[in-house]
Amino acid sequence: MQSKIYFTDMRCKVGESLLVKLDRLMLKAGIEEIDFKQKYTALKIHFGEPGNLSFLRPNFAKTVADRIKALGGKPFLTDCNTLYVGRRNNALVHLDAAGENGYSPLTTGCQNIIADGLKGTDDIEIPVPGGVYCKTARIGRAVMDADIIISLNHFKGHEGAGFGGAIKNLGMGCGSRAGKMVMHNDGKPEIDQKVCTGCKVCPKFCNQNAILFGDAKKARIDPNLCVGCGRCIGGCNYHAIANRSESSSQGLNAKMAEYCKAVVYGRPNFHISVVNQVSPYCDCHGENDAAIIPDIGIFAGFDPVALDKACIDAVNAAPIIATSVLAERDRAHRDHFTDIHPATNWQSQISHAEKIGLGSREYELITVK
């Protein structure tokens, strides 16, 4: 069955802004069908890694939050902490990064809440209906405490998944540190012996007694005892502990789809993708390369799978910007995402999401002027 996906382009006549078009798009796509009255609404956003300038401007989030409030809801902007060392790997620096990139109650009209807490360990384990790779998912607690989930994402390329859209925004984005570890590998972190200072703080965060010290007085993790909770990563002040990125593109995509289903299952959800400044890499980078195609527009709907597929099709149909990295690549695949990242398999994200009942790749595209 085809899902209805609504689209508006980036063209604006004099006297009407793109934000007005976004609000009209949401209404046409049926956001009013959701009962927001007195409901806590998680508006999942990527605040952008400082230094990256392709993340969504907070003006987009404000427009969505204002519409939710007009419908009686209680919105808050949210994201979970990252696994890697950067400006968003604990709630303190994460909120600093959000503020630096313009996200604050003054600019968006709602609060920023880091869903998995100070060190990325405040999560809840929930079932994954129909999960093949994951029977349960570790999701940031604030996301699961919400009554409604709304995804607002910047559509772009991704070096591991092929592309990043609604599924990745909710799947990877709502996973706690332990959840991200499962999606990226087998969930077992490692300690860099060259960086470890032997301070012996990390064992205080391990409930499994999995962190041991040898003759060199450096910490190591026993993988047979480790359960992959990720608490030690957040507890290390020297960034000596990290995950191992070992999942194939197909495994990563399948796990993200399953985590996305866990997030949206059993409660109202709605999805918006802004296809502008389509960078070849994720907004998690502290920089962004030039856009690979011209700006396209904004897509919205209730089906995250159909939404992602509509965005993929639109990007692949768009002309290549001559000054972008895509123009330098061998375009033998005739697929923008595969040509940029040949080792990835973006199709696996869509096919597995459809297989587990997250949505349909078949869609009807409805243009909103």
Image (cartoon, rainbow, N blue to C red):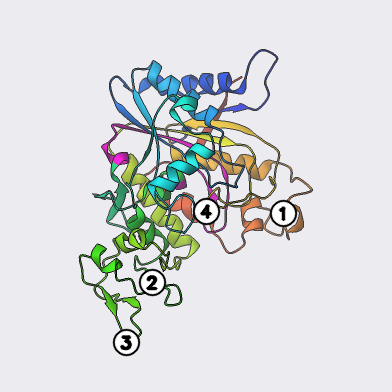
Mark 2 or 4 closer to N-term? 2
**Residue under numbered circle 1:** 325
Residue at point 30%, 64% (across, down):
228
**Residue under numbered circle 3:** 215
- Chain part drawn in magenta: 142-168
In front of the other: label 4 or label 3? Answer: 3
Is 343 magenta? The answer is: no
In front of the other: label 2 or label 4? Answer: 2
Is 160 magenta? The answer is: yes
Residue at point 62%, 57% (across, down):
338
Circle on res. 181:
none
Q: Give the CA separation, mark 1 to mark 2.
A: 34 Å
Mark 1 or 4 closer to N-term? 1
**Residue under numbered circle 4:** 347
Q: Amino acid at mark 1?
A: Val
In front of the other: label 1 or label 2? Answer: 2
Q: Give the CA separation, mark 1 to mark 3.
A: 49 Å
Callout 3 secondary element: loop
Q: Amino acid at mark 4?
A: Gln
**Residue under numbered circle 2:** 190
Q: Give the CA separation, mark 1 to mark 4.
A: 21 Å
